[in-house]
Image (cartoon, rainbow, N blue to C red):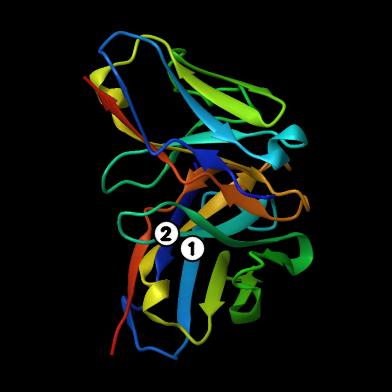
Amino acid sequence: QVQLQESGPGLVKPSETLSLTCSVSGGSINLFSWNWIRQPAGKGLEWIGRIYTRGTTNYNPSLKSRVTMSGDTSKNAISLNLYSVTAADTAVYYCAREVGTTSAFDIWGQGTVVTVSS
Amino acid sequence: SSELTQDSAVSVALGQTVRITCQGDSLRSYYVSWYQQKPGQAPLIILYDNNNRPSGIPDRFSGSSSGSTASLIITGAQAEDEADYYCNCRDTSGFHVVFGGGTKLTVL
C-alpha cells in the first residue's frame, strides 16, 4: 500500500528556508495530487499547497509568496520549500495524497515537527 | 467567503448520537470530507464526498451536506470516538483547499 514519509531538519533559523521531502512508497507520484498541510501545536490544520500533473502547483494564497513545491520522479518524492520563515511557521508538517477532485486526503504521512528558532 | 466554521467543542453521552457541523459558502459548490485526529497522530479520513466512508471506517459515521452546512453524524458514539474532527473542501475558487477550525468531541 502507499506510504508517505516526511523528512527534513527539525530546527530552522528565522529568515531562513524550511525544506522538507515527502518520500512516497508503494505508488508513483505521477498519479494523484500530493499536498502539504501543517498544524501548529494545539491548533488546526492549514493547507499549504499541492503539486500534481506535470508539476502543476496550487498554493494557499496566504503563503503563496513564500512557497514552492516540486516533484522528483527519480526519487518518487515531493518537496516543500518555505522561505523567510518566522516563529509562526513552527508546526507539524504533513504530506498527504489527494484523491479525485474533491480534496479528500486519503493517505497521510506521520508528520514531521519543524521549529523555527535561533 | 472561503472559510469553514466548526464549533470548537461538542460532547456526547456514550452510545448517543452527535452531530458535528461545518459551515461555509464553498460547501454550496463542493463536496466535503471529514477527518478524525487523535493526540499525537496524523488525521484519518472518515468521510469523503459528503457521505462516503473509506474502507475500515465504522458505519456509525455518516454525513450530509445541504446548502452551506455539512454535518458529520456519529450514531452510537463510542469512547474511542473521542478526538478532534476536521472538515475540508475546495474554496470558492475551486483551486485551493480550506479546513474548518476543528471540533473537539468529548464522549461522556
**Circle 1 sits on which residue?**
A23
Q: Residue at x 67, y 67 (%)?
A: A61
The C terminus of chain A: image quadrant: bottom left
Q: Nearer the viewer, residue A21 or A63?
A: A63
Is residue A8 something one can see in this rendering?
A: no
Mark 1 or mark 2: name the one nearer the start of the chain: 2
Q: Please report the residue visible at 38 percent of the width from the left and 88 percent of the height from the top.
A: A14
Q: Position of residue A79 (x, y in %)?
A: 55, 72
Q: Is residue B46 visible?
A: yes
Distance between mark 1 and mark 2 Cα atoms: 5 Å
Q: Please indicate whether residue B7 sits to the left or right of residue B94 in the image.
A: left
Secondary structure type for disc 2: strand
In the rendered view, tell whether residue B49 sits above or below residue B99. Answer: above
Please report the residue visible at 35 percent of the width from the left and 78 percent of the height from the top.
A9
Q: Is residue B22 above or below residue B74?
A: below
Instruction: Please state which amino acid type lies under the numbered disc 2.
Output: Gln
Q: Amino acid at mark 1?
A: Ser
- Say which residue label 2 marks: A5
| On screen, residue B7 above or below A51 | above
User: Mark 2 packing: few (<14 Cα in 10 Å), some, or many (20+)?
Assistant: some
Q: Position of residue B16 (x, y in %)?
A: 33, 9
Towards the viewer: A84 or A26: A84
Disc 2: host chain: A
